[in-house]
Amino acid sequence: MGIYFSILNSNDNDESAYMLKPKIDVEMYSGQWFELARIDNWFERGQHDATAVYEVIDENTLSVVNTAVLANGALTSIKGTGTIVPNTNNYRLNVQFKLCGVCYTCSPTSGNYCILEVGCVNELRQYSYSIVANPERTQLWVLYRHDCMHPYKLKQLLESVKLNYRFNVELKDIVYRNNALRKLMKKVCKF
């Protein structure tokens, strides 16, 4: 599969675990990501075909714009800022979004987004995929640079998430990018 680097079976609150891994290059992380799979959550319920665009503001800060399609076909988007948590080799971000002028986070934990794993660097010098979660392991996103991934590769990534990162979720309960991908995954995973 070509995993570039990851944090496996580590205590996410143990800063020494991050220092043992190569630093995530925020320039290679920036750009557009397509959300291929996620654990359902209240703030994305009923949405599909989501994307996230990250841009580097400075060495410690990223901007993020999340966009998705609502059930009625309308587009929705929200803007936020991610601040890198010190001493985590850029694996942890505090992300805040603004909604109607009010800042909020989707998780109460400091370092509310954990980049668990990134894939090989592609021809554009970007990471090819990213697996992101919250520290409580109740939120999960599989992000990819294209809007489609071979279903067997996606199944392998999701099974790796369950095994390596202690997620207690069934593949049939994952929310997939759209109905077409869900049908393919249903066939491949036999759920």
Image: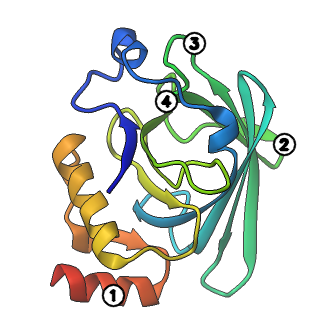
Q: Which mark is residue 101?
A: 2
- Please tell me which of labels 2 and 3 falls first in the chain: 3
Which of labels 4 and 3 is toward the front?
Answer: 3
The residue located at (34%, 90%) in the rendering is 183
User: Considering depth in this image, is 59 or 70 the residue closer to the camera?
Assistant: 59
Q: Which mark is residue 184?
A: 1
- Please tell me which of labels 3 and 1 falls first in the chain: 3
Residue that carries the numbered disc 3 in the rendered image: 86
**Residue 103 position in % (x across, y down):** 73, 36
Residue that carries the numbered disc 4 in the rendered image: 108
The residue located at (20%, 42%) in the rendering is 164
Tally of numbered tags: 4
Badge 3 vs badge 1, beta-carbon distance below 8 Å: no
In the rendered view of the protein, which quadrant contains the N terminus?
A: bottom left
Q: Name the residue type under label 2.
A: Gly
Q: With respect to residue 45, does 159 lie above or below? A: above
Q: Secondary structure at mark 2?
A: loop
